[in-house]
Amino acid sequence: MFPSDYSERLDKVAAYIGLGANLGDPIEAIKSARLAINNVAGIRELAFSSLYRSTPLGPADQPDYVNAVMSVETTLRPLELLRELQAIETAHGRVRKGERWGARTLDLDLLLYGRERIVSEVLTVPHPGIADREFVLYPLGEIAPDLDIPGKGLLADLVRKCPQRGLEVIEHA
């Protein structure tokens, strides 16, 4: 549910965005998406993780992913931020086919929005897979090691419980 004050929100909120790509030039896609996010009015970058290589969650017949996590400060409301992220994905050639975990030119996930818990038809925050995905937890731990994830617990505890499953740093921040 969205609290009623979201329509009035103009305060700065810390949000975390997961970035991933495995088609074309994934490293360039992540770097380009970072610049595009920084160019959105109402968003200011706070931190950016190293780039990581991870094996895909879905079908095995796709290339490995490149992943990162970005921390931003924003005055955008959650759905406004989501729309901006989806517009950036589209500008990078992302086509939504309804397929889960398939190959993509760019995937931008709103992982956290302040301390909010949001459940709607189009957005769930914290991101539903945040506590189980090494390609989110390790980069997130790199830039926000003391983070407490609403409803999930301390990030450091989640990282300790999550095997790396082949995750590796390919480019340091």
Image (tube, rainbow, N blue to C red):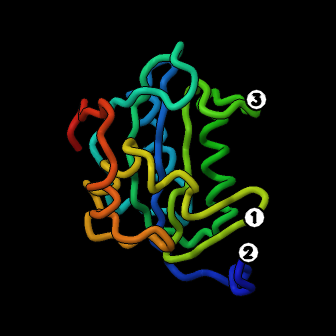
Name the residue rendered at 26%, 64% in the picture: 145
**Residue that mark 3 sits on:** 97
User: Judging from the image, what secondary structure is the residue with disc 2 in?
Assistant: loop
**Residue that mark 1 sits on:** 120
Instruction: Give coordinates of residue 92: x percent, y percent.
Output: 59, 31
Q: What kind of residue is marked 1?
A: Ser
Which of 17/129 is in front?
129
Q: What kind of residue is marked 2?
A: Met
> Which residue is most to the left?
172
User: Judging from the image, what secondary structure is the residue with disc 3 in?
Assistant: loop
On the rendered image, what quadrant is the C terminus found in? top left
Name the residue rendered at 59%, 64% in the picture: 125
Instruction: Give coordinates of residue 162: x percent, y percent.
Output: 33, 49
Instruction: Give coordinates of residue 72: x percent, y percent.
Output: 43, 62
**Residue that mark 2 sits on:** 1
Name the residue rendered at 73%, 75% in the picture: 1
Pointers 2 and 3 in contact (C-beta within 8 Å): no
